[in-house]
Image (cartoon, rainbow, N blue to C red):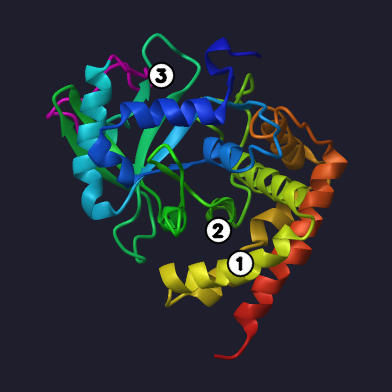
Amino acid sequence: MANPENNMRLVDPAVALQEIADAVPTACRKHVIIIGSLAAGYYYRDQLKGMAVRTKDADCLLSPRVAALKAGIAIAEELRDAGWEFKKTKGHKVPGTEDTPDAELPAVRLSPPGKIEWFIELLTVPESPGDRGPRWTRLKTKYGDFVLPSFRFLSLANLDPVATEMGISIARPEMMALANLLEHPEIKTDTMSGGFADRMDIKRSNKDLGRVLAIARLAMGRDEDALQSWPALWKTALQDRFPDEWRVLAGRAGQGLRVLLANEQEQDLEQALYTCANGLLASKKPTLTQLRITGGRLLQDAIKPLEAEARKRA
């Protein structure tokens, strides 16, 4: 059943990035890295030919972590001062108080004044390579208490980000792809808590792996052989961020994608296709066959060579 509250809107990545940059305190812009569909859409704006992407959030990664807490408070307060509105969710109608347990605090999700098309969400990078699970850091602001989430593989998204003329940066698409591949070595049953577009059955694994396929498809649209450069970039990134276990991580980077592509009933792949067609590739909708071909090329050109590097003797 359609859920109007979850419908995603078409957003021009350049316009959204400019709006974020204009609203973020000047001193904090150097700490902001946009990740997700907006970042990929802006990076591949030539391939999208100026068309919009369909999204409902702009994930803002605050980096480095040592500056994230202060920047998070400054950004949240300045945006609220400027009229950005708290994004209500089913579980969080208002910000938390000092008495709210950390586990029950909302993330910083704020919509531009008078708009419901999209909202920003603040995140940060893990404290160390050994931080294996999600972490929640309390943000105490004059508008209430929030949490600043961090997830293990976000440390790949802040590696050599791409600066924009707006003063904020975007994550490199190949790093976002690797982070999503590593985050999902299997197709888990948990679904998107807020739904995706007008569907409530979309598995988070299918959504994130679908974004990997969307990024790969856009990369090949720019350069047919683009994916062949990814293994070396991925190896360097893993050695930098996870020096003690890069071989293990490299060796399992393709597990989840293989499960997705081998889904005989095509239910999981269909969900990945749906997220592409109603997300990053909303203006260039692929077919199921085209998405499967993209996955095959990604395995051949990027994942298998990375796995081969992991098997080499030190």
Identify which amino acid the numbered label 3 is placed on: Lys
Is residue 302 rendered to the left or right of residue 8?
right
* Position in image of residue 19 (x %, y %): 41, 25
Q: How far apart are the two marked residues, 2 and 1, measured between alpha carbons?
A: 7 Å
Name the image quarter holding residue 307: bottom right
Is residue 75 rendered to the left or right of residue 247?
left
The residue indicated by pointer 2 is 182
Residue at the (23%, 40%) spot, across then down? 27
Q: What element carries label 3?
A: loop
Assign the N terminus to one quadrant of the image: top right
Q: Residues within 10 Å of mark 2 (few under 14, many from 20)?
A: many
**Residue 242 visible here:** no
Identify which amino acid the numbered label 2 is placed on: Leu
Residue at the (54%, 56%) spot, across then down? 175
Q: State yes or no: residue 97 in magenta.
A: yes
Is residue 291 rendered to the left or right of residue 70?
right
Check residue 90 in the rendering and tell me which mark sits there, or answer none. Answer: 3
Does the CB distance between marks 2 and 1 fall below 8 Å? Answer: yes
Q: What element carries label 1?
A: loop
Identify which amino acid the numbered label 1 is placed on: Arg
The residue indicated by pointer 1 is 252
The magenta segment is 83-101
Is residue 149 rendered to the left or right of residue 180?
left
Q: Mark 3 or mark 1, which is nearer the start of the sequence?
A: 3
Does the CB distance between marks 1 and 3 fall below 8 Å? Answer: no
**Residue 95 visible here:** yes
